[in-house]
Amino acid sequence: MYAIIATGGKQYKVSEGDIIKVEKLGVEAGSEYTFDQVIAVNGDKMLVGSDVANATVTASVIEDGKSKKVIVYKYKRKSGYHKKNGHRQPYTKVKIEKINA
């Protein structure tokens, strides 16, 4: 059984027991979080639309962290302009506990 959830502007295909990294949720580690934007659930048959209007996915928060650094380098030729910048995207690691369809 799996579900497709939406969070942070992205969609994730999750099953019970999966550990995924999602955009930072602002919830402390060790607590529960409920994803209520469920797009589809596949158990015995595929459920979409109004069939999954009340479906939720429960997950436990493992940790917060930052991804690997991405280097952003801006350069314009002949003018001597260059700028180096870095970015580390924050994430929350969650473990999927239960799919409530």
Image (cartoon, rainbow, N blue to C red):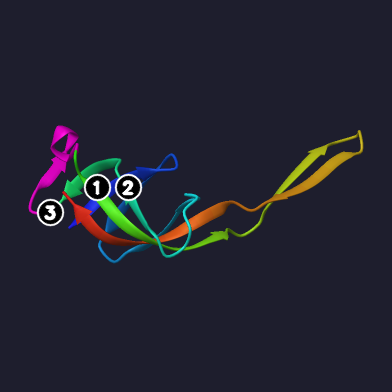
Q: Which residue is mark 1?
A: 56
Nearer-the-camera pick, 55 or 32:
32
**Could you tell me which secondary element the residue under label 3 belongs to?**
loop
Q: Residues within 10 Å of mark 1 (few under 14, many from 20)?
A: many
Residue lying furthest left: 44
**Could you tell me which secondary element the residue under label 2 belongs to?**
strand
The stretch drawn in magenta includes residue 76: no
**Image vertical order of residue 83 relative to residue 17, above or below:** above
* Image location of residue 66, percent across then percent down: 59, 58
Question: Whole-Å distance between the Cαs marked 2 and 1?
Answer: 6 Å
**On-image quarter of the N terminus:** bottom left
- Precedes in sequence: disc 3 or disc 1: 3
- Precedes in sequence: disc 2 or disc 1: 2
Question: Whole-Å distance between the Cαs marked 3 and 2?
Answer: 18 Å
- Precedes in sequence: disc 3 or disc 2: 2
Q: Which residue is mark 3?
A: 43
Question: What residue span does the magenta drawing correspond to?
Answer: 43-53
Q: Which residue is mark 2?
A: 35
**Image vertical order of residue 11 relative to residue 66, above or below:** above
